[in-house]
Amino acid sequence: MGDPRRLRKKYETPSHPWEEERIKRENELMRKYGLKNKREIWKAETILRKYRTEARKLLARVGSEDPAYKREVDQLLNHLIRMNLIKPGAGLDDCLALTIEDILKRRLQTIVYLKGLASTPKQARQLIVHGHIAIGGRKVTVPGYMVRADEEKDIDYAVDSPLYDPSHPARPKVDRIPRQSLEVKEA
């Protein structure tokens, strides 16, 4: 009955529930990126942890002449390049230099805001959830969708969305001016 695969959490919770420094850092990230809850931060941290663990394992075998080693290094680096997390020509050391912010910047919600399709990160989330954003003509309703480098140019309003009309009043005032970074507004 039901789906045969094993359902697992996609994140690991912090080992200690009350660490003031971690909580402050998470609250700032939530404000900056318009996240719904800390679980989204923990998912990004888990993704980052997996990349870094894999890079450390490969660095430990650095002198190996094994063809599987070279293939695994190429696979990891190509994956990170496709996700636009590292630049072409980067090495395993660059994988270890990745931060949680690098992962959060690849979320659809962040990219929609940075492209100027939404006025705020929270509005970007709402537009995505309500089906107003499409990638390459296909609606994507998951704000945490990790956008690949080749998909980034195809992000736009969905064709059947009322926001597709350039004169729609809900579109951002400064229409499609790409932002360079996210600003943190103090409450």
Image (cartoon, helix red, strand yellow):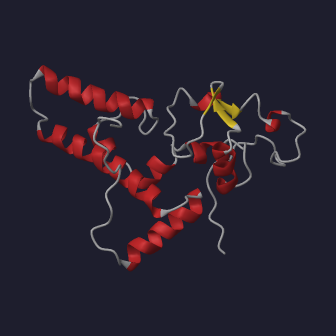
Q: Residue at x 58, y 65 (%)?
A: 31
Nearer to us in this view, 40 or 120: 40
Can you give x and y, in whole percent of width and height, for residue 123 in the image? 70, 53
Mark count: 0
Can you give x and y, in whole percent of width and height, for residue 113 in the image? 66, 47
Position of 68 relative to 40 (above/below): above
Nearer to us in this view, 153 or 46: 46
Residue 59 figure quarter: top left
Quadrant containing the C terminus in the rendered view: bottom right
Position of 187 relative to 150 (above/below): below
61 relative position to 136: left or right: left
**Residue 134 visible in image:** yes
Quadrant containing the N terminus in the rendered view: top left
Q: Residue at x 36, y 30 (%)?
A: 79
Residue 92 figure quarter: top left
Q: Residue at x 66, y 24 (%)?
A: 137
**Residue 114 visible in image:** no
